[in-house]
Amino acid sequence: MVTSAVLTPVVVPAIYFLWTERALADNCSRLGCICASPSPTPLMGFEQYHEPANELSARTRTFARMITSLTEEAEAIGWYEQRISLEKDKQAKAIMQNAQHEEMKHFGMDLEFLLRRTPKWRETLKGILFTKGDIVKRGDEGEEASE
């Protein structure tokens, strides 16, 4: 049996990939992934905190998880957009559009959670979201209104 031909699952945020043992060795540390490899080498998990987790409050850890979730939802929306733009099969495309819509809903729920916890952000975004006119100008006005 050739080791490099064995497929090993690698977990990165929101995606599961299959990599060969060689690709695993070459890419794992660069990707910051959690490996399900039987390798005796210690494995480093994805770290969403930039400060020691045990020193952060539960509220801050939840906030970090929600920011991570928001980011993952935004990435998924983008991935679906790319897939949809190339898909020729109408049924497959409709399924992907439905899935993308679900990701947008999750993105919105994550954002709403964060805005409820961060009133200043909500105040800023009130001047930007669901408005008409120049987006940059509205952004500047929204920021000023929240200061």
Image (cartoon, grey):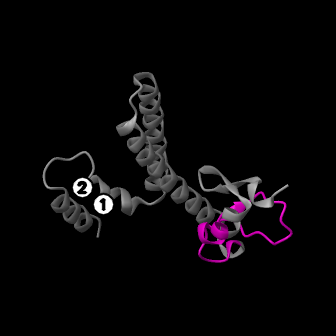
In the image, residue 50 lies in the stretch drawn in magenta: yes
Magenta residues span: 26-53
Which residue bears the numbered disc 1? 124
Which residue bears the numbered disc 2? 127
Residue at the far left: name it. 133
Whether 1 is drawn above or below 145: the answer is above
Badge 1: how crowded within 10 Å, few (<14), some, or many (20+)?
Answer: many
Q: Quadrant of the N terminus?
A: bottom right
Give the SS element for disc 1: helix
The residue under label 2 is which amino acid type? Answer: Gly
Residue drawn at (72%, 70%), measured in percent from left and top? 44
In the image, residue 131 lies in the stretch drawn in magenta: no
Q: Are marks 1 and 2 in contact (CB under 8 Å)?
A: yes
Q: Is residue 6 left or right of residue 106?
A: right
Residue 85, image x and y in percent?
Answer: 35, 39
Residue at the far front: name it. 1
The residue under label 1 is which amino acid type? Answer: Thr
Residue 28, image x and y in percent?
Answer: 66, 67
Give the SS element for disc 2: loop
Main SS, magenta region, reads loop
Residue at the far top: name it. 91
Residue drawn at (42%, 25%), measured in percent from left and top? 89
User: 73 or 137: which is nearer to us?
Assistant: 73
Q: Is residue 130 left or right of residue 77?
A: left
Badge 2: how crowded within 10 Å, few (<14), some, or many (20+)?
Answer: many
